[in-house]
Image (cartoon, rainbow, N blue to C red):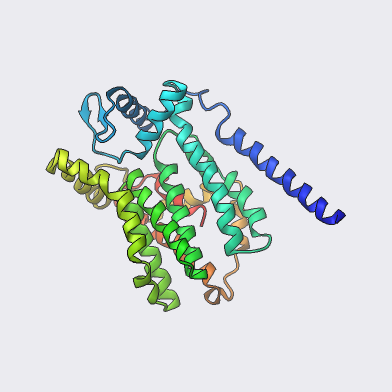
Amino acid sequence: MVGMFGLRRNAVAYTAFLAVLGWFLYFQGASSAGLIGPDEPRYAQVSREMLRNHDWITPYLHGDPWFEKPPLYYWLTAGAFAIFGVNEAAARLPAAIFAVGFVILFAWQTRRLFPGETTRYAVPILLSSLGWIAFGRAATMEMMFSALLAGALGFLGLWLWQGRRRWLFGFHGLLALTMLSKGLGGVVLAALILLAYCVVTREFRWLLRVLNPWAVTLFSVIALPWYAAMQFKHGHAFFDEFIVRQHFRRYVTSELAHPGPWWFYLPILLIGMFPWTAHLGLLRFRGLIHDHRRVFLLCWVGMVLAFFSASQGKLSGYILVALPG
């Protein structure tokens, strides 16, 4: 009885420590610096105009339709502006909430995939990694997209390992939200990761089972109405800019993002893991193929690296989704 009380007290202290750490790393001093670079001011202004215009379908920048990104960040930031006023902290609040909120989901998913001590170490490592902190304090979509996609992949891993259909609904639900946060990239990455896992493990049955009709319906109900509304309202202008230019041309040319060598993301990933980078040397690959959970995580990180390394346009935030894996 005394031992159980001691364990519970240690767990409370550990949780309190992480909560305080999360506050100082992601929320404290969020308005101490002005909006940085071209993206933070631009996205904040689009959110401000959405709040002012009360047009919750079409994003606008300086009065003109802005088709570069989907509306989820703008919706949440406009809501933060309405509650807390138009300021830097409100613009950065959605990223901070998603950064910390995902760590909570990450702890829950990790505990079910890897019972034992893994969660005790994995959670503070992710919470205090430089890459997660940097984008968790930025008024951009990278953290929102990465948290949603990583959460979806966590549910996918649970479904592959346990076979319970409810995890499949979690996967499709969060994957649908990635469509509203940054477009089609999340669906493409999830498909590539699942395909790689099936090839390595030779369990191709998952490719059809993932398309459960009810789960796909949930995905469609969440993801597609905004796209349909924008296509109906703006026609070819939306399709040409958002789909053709912002997706395909952004990937196959460097006109919308910075060019870089194939190894561009390797140092970015190592820097993003700081101060825990050296712990990568503790990874053990012996018997990896026999542990399908670790195979899935290797496919997760490997396919994210491969997909974005093949892109002609490279930005450091693209690789953020690999950190939880």
Q: In this view, does 95 lie to the left or right of 11?
A: left
- Which of the two residues, 289 or 194, is positioned nearer the viewer here? 194
Please state the horizontal and vertical placement of residue 201, each as a whole percent of the image: 45, 76
Q: Is residue 240 left or right of residue 112?
A: left
The answer to which image quadrant residue 3 occupies is: bottom right
- Which of the two residues, 241 or 13, is positioned nearer the viewer here? 13
Rendered residue at 48%/26% (across/down): 89
Q: Above or below — where is 101 with respect to 283?
A: above
Rendered residue at 63%/56% (across/down): 119
Toward the front, the furthest residue is 214
Please state the horizontal and vertical placement of residue 24, each as a whole percent of the image: 61, 33
Please state the horizontal and vertical placement of residue 228, each as a whole percent of the image: 21, 46
- Which of the two residues, 55 or 21, is positioned nearer the viewer here? 55
Please state the horizontal and vertical placement of residue 115, each as a whole percent of the image: 64, 64
Residue 158 in view, yes or no:
yes
In the picture, which quadrant includes the N terminus? bottom right
Toward the right, the furthest residue is 2
Residue 301 in view, yes or no:
no
Q: Above or below — where is 197 with respect to 98?
A: below
Rendered residue at 37%/71% (across/down): 209
